[in-house]
């Protein structure tokens, strides 16, 4: 069966999804374009405060009438299991929506993104009856209980690069913990999240628990952060927006935040890395997958000088073996850039980097494609000094900087970044060196002989320093949506 499809045949969700149904609300019209060919996918409105207010009222009513927080945990789990099953049943439709609206390729969105979204919901459904508290040490006349409670209503804001899966990392644990959710994805990619909210309602999730509002960040996103009845914010996006959200949350009732932010992740390759063809394939994929629009993209290659020329020439060869094209064509292997604005930002940064002393080994230009979409050529830059924009800032595009070192300490010094600390990978067959390097690198995630997290949901993802704090996924992912209450009983 071919995965390719005709985008004109797909139903596009319309409206905000609040209180278990689609609702039209007045607001500025936003045209949502397909990044592959810049044709109109659908219209949404910027819901702003009115949409967020409505969603919060629905969440309050939903929590009250369903008793979600106080429900037997296995019943909450069962509702989420039904939701997961429905996501799986609708994986083709969800994958098609995701492929039309984002930079994700149809070869990935059904079998990987949609199926993993179902997996995330199922993983957290299984947690519902495993949320436990503790009894702490006291004298014989007292009982000290520590309970883990949901916050009530939580807000979640996510970006456009993996719209379904980054959303699921937040709504699934939030719901499993007993909260109601008001969330927003990027105004560039609203449709797959709306479809997920519809499936949640169809699966019988009580109305009002899972609300999706559409709109811009500075209006609708900020209204979520400011709302006095939203108790916690979980955000994924750029470091700059994360800082603005943290500041707004501090002014809006000292609201706790989880921030999953940008990165500038190094790929450190030692001369004993092994099969260089395999290593080159991994390194190339780590900066070209999703056209580099991945928070953990391996955007800095730091390679031991003895193998540097050979490895770089193999990576350059792989940049030429790509097929850029529509995301709904299963033969496409190289993704478009999400928008003209993002394309131009990458191009401007590459040009600035070159004007500051870098040289392009390959790329550095717009890529001709089979249609009108925004494609940027895989680009490799060398001679990128620590003051160069190409070192300091995240491209969030298919750009790799390369540098070399002669001993591991020098390599580790190059791997350190003054701002970011999201992820890093080390490629070597020497386990001692690998583990020492992993200890030395200041980043929230370190991978050895691969770049990118594995498929398991157990693995907590999140960064250090300017890459944020708090974790999505794993046990930490649900703990983020629980707060501890200490209860003291005097029975003396
Ligand atoms: P962005 O920060 O521009 O926007 C992210 C979301 O925040 C969007 O929904 C946007 O509408 C909203 N937003 C923007 N301004 C806001 C404001 N003032 N108040 C409230 N909400 C606001 O990021 P983007 O361009 O959509 O995504 C790319 C960025 O996301 C990159 O920096 C990337 O590294 C990061 N990212 C991080 C992770 C991670 O897990 N660490 C994962 C994916 C993406």
Image (cartoon, helix red, strand yellow):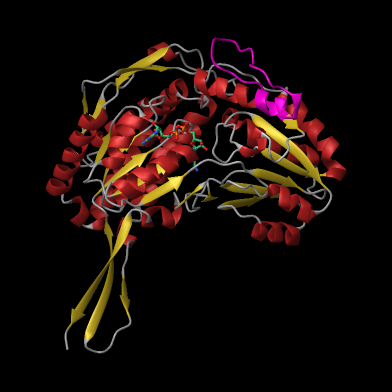
Asked whether 370 falls inside the magenta stretch, the response is yes
Q: Range of the magenta residues?
A: 351-380
User: Along the line of sight, which residue is nearer the eye, 200 or 91?
Assistant: 200
The picture quadrant where one finds residue 191 is top left
Say whether residue 35 is left or right of residue 181: right
Q: Residue at x 22, y 39 (%)?
A: 204
At horizontal 28% and vertical 19% (from top left) the residue drawn is: 28
Any part of residue 117 in sight: no
Indicate whether 378 appears above or below 133: above
Secondary structure mainly formed by the magenta segment:
loop
Q: Quadrant of ligand 1?
A: top left
> In the rendering, at what x and y percent does residue 179 appear?
26, 49
**x, y percent for residue 353:** 68, 29
Name the image quarter holding residue 376: top right
Residue at (85%, 42%) from the top-left corner? 307
- Above or below, comparing residue 251 to residue 402 in the picture: below
The image quadrant where one finds the C terminus is bottom left
Residue displayed at 30% across by 54% down? 177
Whether residue 357 is visible to the viewer of this picture, yes or no, is yes
């Amino acid at each position: 069966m071919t995965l390719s499809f005709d985008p004109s045949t797909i139903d596009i969700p319309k409206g905000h999804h609040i209180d278990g149904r689609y609702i039209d609300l007045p607001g500025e019209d936003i045209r949502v374009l397909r990044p592959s060919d810049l044709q109109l996918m659908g219209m949404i409105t910027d819901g702003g405060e009115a949409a967020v207010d409505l969603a919060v009222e629905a969440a309050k009513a939903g929590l009250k009438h369903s008793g979600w927080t106080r429900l037997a945990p296995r019943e909450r789990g069962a509702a989420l299991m039904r939701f997961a099953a429905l996501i799986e049943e609708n994986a083709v439709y969800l994958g098609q929506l995701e492929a039309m609206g984002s930079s994700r390729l149809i070869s990935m969105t059904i079998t990987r993104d949609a199926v993993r979204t179902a997996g995330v919901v199922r993983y957290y459904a299984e947690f519902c009856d495993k949320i436990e508290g503790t009894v702490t040490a006291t004298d014989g006349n007292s009982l000290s209980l520590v309970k883990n409670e949901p916050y009530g209503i939580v807000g979640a804001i996510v970006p456009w690069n993996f719209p379904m899966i980054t959303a699921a990392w937040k709504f699934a644990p939030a719901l499993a913990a007993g909260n109601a959710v008001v969330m927003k994805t990027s105004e560039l990619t609203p449709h797959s999240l709306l479809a997920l909210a519809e499936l949640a309602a169809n699966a019988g999730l009580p109305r009002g628990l899972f609300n999706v509002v559409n709109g811009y960040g500075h209006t609708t996103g900020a209204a979520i952060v400011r709302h006095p009845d939203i108790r916690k914010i979980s955000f994924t996006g750029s470091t700059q927006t994360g800082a603005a959200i943290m500041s707004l949350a501090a002014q809006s009732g000292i609201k706790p935040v989880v921030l999953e932010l940008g990165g500038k992740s190094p790929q450190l390759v030692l001369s004993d890395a092994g099969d260089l063809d395999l290593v080159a394939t991994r390194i190339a994929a780590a900066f070209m997958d999703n056209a580099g629009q991945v928070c953990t993209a391996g955007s800095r290659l730091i390679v031991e000088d003895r193998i540097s020329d050979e490895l770089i020439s193999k990576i350059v060869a792989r940049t030429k073996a790509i097929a850029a094209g529509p995301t709904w064509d299963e033969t496409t292997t190289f993704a478009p850039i999400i928008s003209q604005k993002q394309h131009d930002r990458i191009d401007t940064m590459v040009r600035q980097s070159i004007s500051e002393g870098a040289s392009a080994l390959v790329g550095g230009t717009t890529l001709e494609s089979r249609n009108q979409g925004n494609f940027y050529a895989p680009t490799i830059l060398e001679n990128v000094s620590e003051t160069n924009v190409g070192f300091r800032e995240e491209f969030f595009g298919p750009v790799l900087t390369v540098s070399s070192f002669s001993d591991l300490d020098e390599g580790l010094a190059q791997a350190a970044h003054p701002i970011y600390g999201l992820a890093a990978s080390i490629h070597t067959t020497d386990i001692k060196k690998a583990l020492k390097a992993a200890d030395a690198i200041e980043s929230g995630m370190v991978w050895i002989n691969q770049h990118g997290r594995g498929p398991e949901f157990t693995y907590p993802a999140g960064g250090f320093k300017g890459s944020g704090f708090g974790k999505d996924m794993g046990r930490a992912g649900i703990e983020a949506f629980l707060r501890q209450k200490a209860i003291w009983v005097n029975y003396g």
